[in-house]
Image: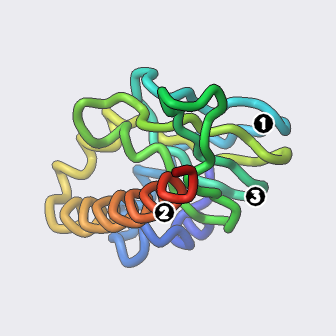
Amino acid sequence: MISMEILSQFNLFNGLPESLLKKIAELSKEVSMKNGDFVFREGEKADKLHFLLQGSVALRVKLTSRPDSVTVSFVSTPFQSFGWSGVVAPHHYTSSAECDEDSDLLIIPAEPFMKLLEKYPEAGFQVMKRIAEIIADRLRNSRQALLKTI
């Protein structure tokens, strides 16, 4: 379990009630991964939300017109989140996440996390607004990366 102090440093959780942070901390799990490990692969069922504690993770998508995947974004700043597909239907990852270096991650299972947000609707609304911002940012990054491949 991660401390509430560390959890509160994530933008996604900024300003949430302490009671909710405590419950999120109880759900969370810290995981260490090696350079080259896949956190998840594009198309897999998404059932977790991921956060970077340290290291670097590349987000890559496959294009039918190219044999190699295209890197659309890097998660390399501590306390960034990724793998938002775990909390957004249809719950399949839209990219692959591969560690570019040894990395420490925080992983939160999506279903119990969403049930918590339902119990705290005001805080849940704030979290989902922030997730929408992350999605918009990744969409912009993906579009720019894909335009460079043309």
Gap in angstroms between the C-alphas marked 1 and 3? 10 Å
Amino acid type indicated by mark 1: Met
- Image coords of residue 49 (percent x, y): 46, 43
Mark 1 or 3, nearer chain start: 1
12 or 43: nearer the eye?
43
37 or 107: nearer the eye?
37
Label 1 near label 2: C-beta < 8 Å? no
Amino acid type indicated by mark 2: Gln
- Image coords of residue 43 (percent x, y): 43, 24
- Image coords of residue 67 (percent x, y): 63, 26
Q: Is residue 33 left or right of residue 146?
A: right
Could you say whether the residue bearing mark 3 is in a helix, strand or loop?
Answer: strand
Name above or below for residue 68 compared with residue 72.
above
Residue at image coords 53%, 45%? 50
Name above or below for residue 150 compared with residue 17.
above
99 or 28: nearer the eye?
99
Residue identifier under label 3 = 54
89 or 6: nearer the eye?
89
Could you say whether the residue bearing mark 2 is in a helix, strand or loop?
Answer: helix
Q: Residue furthest front?
A: 150
Residue identifier under label 2 = 144
Mark 2 or 1, nearer chain start: 1
